Image (cartoon, rainbow, N blue to C red):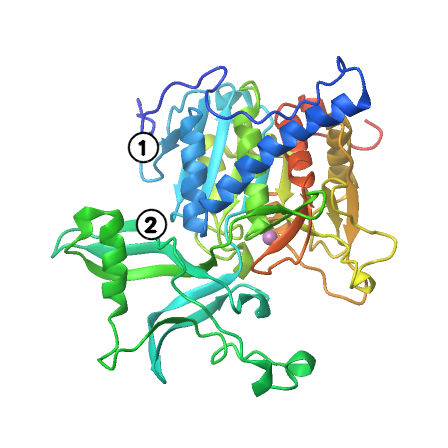
Amino acid sequence: MTCTPGLKRVHTPYPANPSGVILRTDNNTNTLNTSADKRIAVMEHVTEYLDDLFSFIRRSPTAYHATASAADHLAQHGFQRLDEAVSWCGLPPGPYYVVRNDASLIAFTLSSEPQAGLPMRMAGAHTDSPGLKIKPNPIQMHHGYIQLGVEMYGGLLLAPWFDRNLSIAGRVTWACGTAPVRCSLIDFKRAAAVIPSLAIHLDREANEKRHIDKQTDLVPVIMLTDGASPPDFNEIIRKELASQYPEAATATILASDLFLYDLQPPCRAGLNSELVTAPRLDNLLSCHALLRAMTASADNRNRLIVLNNHEEIGSLSMAGAQGPFLRSVLQRLYPDPDLLQRVIARSLFISVDNAHAVHPNFAAKHDPDHPVGLNQGPVIKFNAAQRYATDAITAGLFRQLCTMADIPCQEFVMRNDMISGSTIGPLTAAEIGVPTVDVGAPQLAMHSIRETIGHLDGWYLLKVMTTFFGAEDSHIHCPEPGL
Ligand code: CO
């Protein structure tokens, strides 16, 4: 039977040297004379890398926007979009990507026909970040203020949300009359809301024991009332939608997935600019590194990245890591179950999500023998209860990749008297049975509205992921003892 591959869009053929931004990760400094010259050359690469990361974060206020940014990047580099609703039978070798539910994405390159059964270099990260999600009927009127009811999305730190310039972004479904439903991404891109703190004069114990009530204390203010009836929130959305999509001028808003986000852009910080502060570094930093490594690598290896939504709320969804997305893509690439199992058994999955660096003011929260520092390279995460999927085999493979990439790496393990976090690594390993290592760039203030990293760690991560995607088969697999 002849099948037409389900290409959603036709882009330019996969170029040998894709045009567009290629981030330089090679030190290639051997011809330079002094260590100072080498340091300057590396710093130029790092500055280029950080500019690109900042641009990606600014364009990605929500998981939907992050996925759209990722899709744009892949399309610019010759990846062809596939439609899940169309047959993929007979897919020729090349680079492809597929999006599920607007907020999860899988991209892969096939270097040869799938029947060859070559191993797949796989890596994953998550597109979502903790935040405030706007309720379906959000408008509230209190004491002359118009406010928006919000839900908590994921395990966010609440206190940093006060006194910020907040904007609104997400996706909206709409229709004109009885026409078919459409879905669009919107971004207000302005300070549309604020959650003012309560003055210390009205709560003298604020610095000792202020409790934040999730239902009543975090309700953003969007405007003052004019004494008239409350505004229609859907009308506010419709106007914003029409400003971005003129064809929606007469639309009826049907439903929305909208989030608040901090408008403050990413920036370098510290007297010597060795720090970076930015929103959503967990886990856009990792998504960015995987995407750039994917498009910077030569096309002679099978490789795959999965960027999942819903990690911050447990990953159990149609597009989350505990759902069937990755398995279904692999099953379509390798319809023969025996072939699929052979490929998986020879593959490696690197789960990439940020890790906790030691906070200088709270160092007692960390295992004293496993200090994690900023600018000291990717962190390999261990947990005896498999909250992280790492084991000696996969950690050894990753450590060797770091050696090959000429970057440092470090280890994290949670204190025994604290509960370990987790990520998509163990879920993916359990779903498809692939050897997996959990790693990530070190950071401070995880799940704050503004997080802190070192300026080198994302670049180190990009280097090792580029090395991974170009590695020989023998470097992603470790034979059993004695073999
Ligand atoms: Co994360």
- Indicate which disc, 2 or 1, sits on the residue closer to the N terminus: 1
Q: Nearer the viewer, residue 460 or 428?
A: 460
Q: Is residue 355 left or right of residue 179?
A: right
Residue 362 x, y percent position in the rendering: 78, 64
Give the label on residue 185, or none: 2
Q: Amino acid at mark 1?
A: Lys
* Label 2 near ligand 1 (CB < 8 Å): no
Residue displayed at 41% across by 20% down: 92
Residue 242 seen: yes
Q: Is residue 428 left or right of residue 395?
A: left
Percent coordinates x, y for residue 174 in the rendering: 23, 56
What is the spatial separation of the Cα atoms under label 2 and label 1, in whole angstroms? 19 Å
Q: Residue at x 41, y 47 (%)?
A: 65
Mark 2 neighbour class, 10 Å CA radius: few under 14, some 14 to 19, many 20 or more: many
Q: Which mark is residue 8?
A: 1
Quarter of the image where the C terminus is located: top right
Residue 391 is drawn in which quadrant?
top right
Give coordinates of residue 142: x percent, y percent: 36, 83
Q: Hey, what amino acid is under mark 2?
A: Leu
Q: Are marks 2 and 1 in contact (CB under 8 Å)?
A: no
In the image, residue 241 above or below residue 98:
below
* Neighbours of disc 1 within 10 Å: few (<14), some (14-19), many (20+): some
The image quarter in which residue 190 lies: bottom left
In the image, 284: left or right of 412? left
Q: Residue at x 23, y 59 (%)?
A: 238
Q: Please state which of residues 219 and 179 is positioned toward the viewer in this rendering.
A: 219
Q: Secondary structure at mark 2?
A: strand
